Amino acid sequence: MTHEHVTEPVPESTPPAPDSIPPGPSAAGPTPTPAAPDGRAAASAPSQAAQAAPRKPHAERLTGVVVATALPYAEDPAAPAGLRPDLDRYAEHCRWLVDSGCHGVGPNGSLGEYSSLTDAERRAVARTAVAAVGRDALVVVGVHGVGAHQARRWAEYAAEDGADGVLCLPPTLYRANTAEVVHHFSQVAAVGLPVMVYNNPLDTKVDLTPEMVREIAALDHVVAVKEFSGDVRRVRHLKECAPDLALIAGADDLVVESLLMGADGWFAGFPNVFPAASVRLFELATAGDVAAARALYEPLVAAFRWDSRTEFVQAIKRAMDLVGRYGGPCRPPRGPLSDAHLAALDADVRRAVDALAELAAGAAARGGAADPYGDTAGPAQVGAPLGGGHGGHGGRAGRGER
């Protein structure tokens, strides 16, 4: 897999205080917590709602299919690069993913373009996800930061805002040694939320080896490791070195291999496009139904490979447009996909869509569900003609950490 390191901006100082965050969207349907009487977003309300909600079966170790959510933008000349996060549309997307069977959402990963957001925007995105789905699904917020003090502050805000857990890389922009990495995660874990540590050595240049993960696993509140080294042999090695941690598959194009070798979850990109089919794939692989999992995986994996490419954000947003969802544009530094990339991506998505339609028709002919691979996605997901979508293939480049 080829990746390009995404430049992490140094936060404007520290992340913004609660009273500096604008209220969330106000569209009909799931909306973030209403503003307090003084006009501020009520940060504690999502947390209280989450505490009152029924226990989520995947919350203890942040397992299941958690979607690294893409972030839609709306044109706004006053916003950075002329684009502002469309929080209404983002809330709807989170709700659609959960209603399609996904177990949770992951705002503020690289697929969510966290490194291109202002601090205020970044927090507003996390709050929107909690308000949209936090009562009945996991919200695992990305708290990546250059230093431990920054990552810890983002984790503190995630806790205040009602997140179920956090996803955290080692220090970005610096090739930290083992002691520095352990210190980084210890500061994040000290906040008290369940922590999923994230190994992405191709981007951070820090490899969380199984031996290092063993040391990190001794920290209280570290419950999972997301593995994105591209080496499926790591699954068993990590299980041996840190048996109490949940092992989370991080690469879409290695997900079945990882699940068959014992991974407990999937922190995923392409479920933004094919959520119902992705959940079905996860269920088949974790149940050990190799034949059925392979039959579903093989026509999807060419599309899934885009998740491990430099242009993964652009590709996933384009694929969303192609199946009738809204992906839309990206902020800089991500530039337009080339004509060659568009042609190749469109062919891979077309193959996936056609295969899902064929599988759905076969299931219906056998007396099963009419559409077990996309019943909540709308007809475009399972075979309607691919169109130009919403023009979201422009603007993006640089595979970074999700």
Image: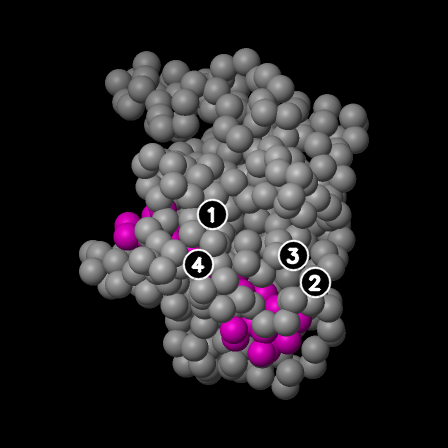
Real-space Cα separation, disc 3 to disc 4, in angstroms: 17 Å
Identify the mark nearer the N-term, 2 or 4.
2
* Secondary structure under the numbered disc 3 in the rendered image: helix
Report, in whole angstroms, how far the alpha carbon at label 4 lies from the one at label 1. Answer: 9 Å
On the image, the x and y values in percent for residue 33 come to: 33, 52
Counting residues from the start of the chain, the first of labels 4 and 1 encountered is 1
Query: Left or right of 378: which side holds 395?
Result: right
- Whether pointer 3 and pointer 2 mark residues with C-beta atoms closer than 8 Å, the reply is yes
- Going by the numbered disc 1, the residue's amino acid type is Val
Per the rendered image, the range of residues in magenta is 126-153
Q: Give the numbered dot on residue 9.
A: 2
Nearest the eye: 58 or 394: 394
Look at the image and say whether residue 144 sits in the magenta stretch.
Answer: yes
User: Label 1, label 3: how many angstroms apart (C-alpha)?
Assistant: 18 Å
Toward the bottom, the furthest residue is 179
For residue 115, the mark is 3
Judge depth for marks 1 and 2 and give the one in front. 2
Label 2 or label 4, whichever lies nearer to me, is 2
Q: Marks 1 and 4: in contact by CB < 8 Å?
A: no
Residue 401 lies, in percent from the top left, at 63, 56
Which is closer to the viewer, label 1 or label 3? 3
SS at circle 4: strand
Per the rendering, the mark at residue 67 is: 1
Q: Earlier in the sequence, mark 1 or mark 2?
A: 2
Q: State the residue at coordinates (52%, 73%).
A: 153
How far apart, in angstroms, are the residues tagged by discs 1 and 2?
24 Å
Do residues under tags 1 and 3 come within 8 Å of each other at their CB atoms? Answer: no
Q: Amino acid at mark 4?
A: Val
Give the image location of residue 324, x and y in percent: 51, 24
Whether residue 293 appears in this view of the structure is no
Amino acid type of the residue tagged 2 in the rendering: Pro
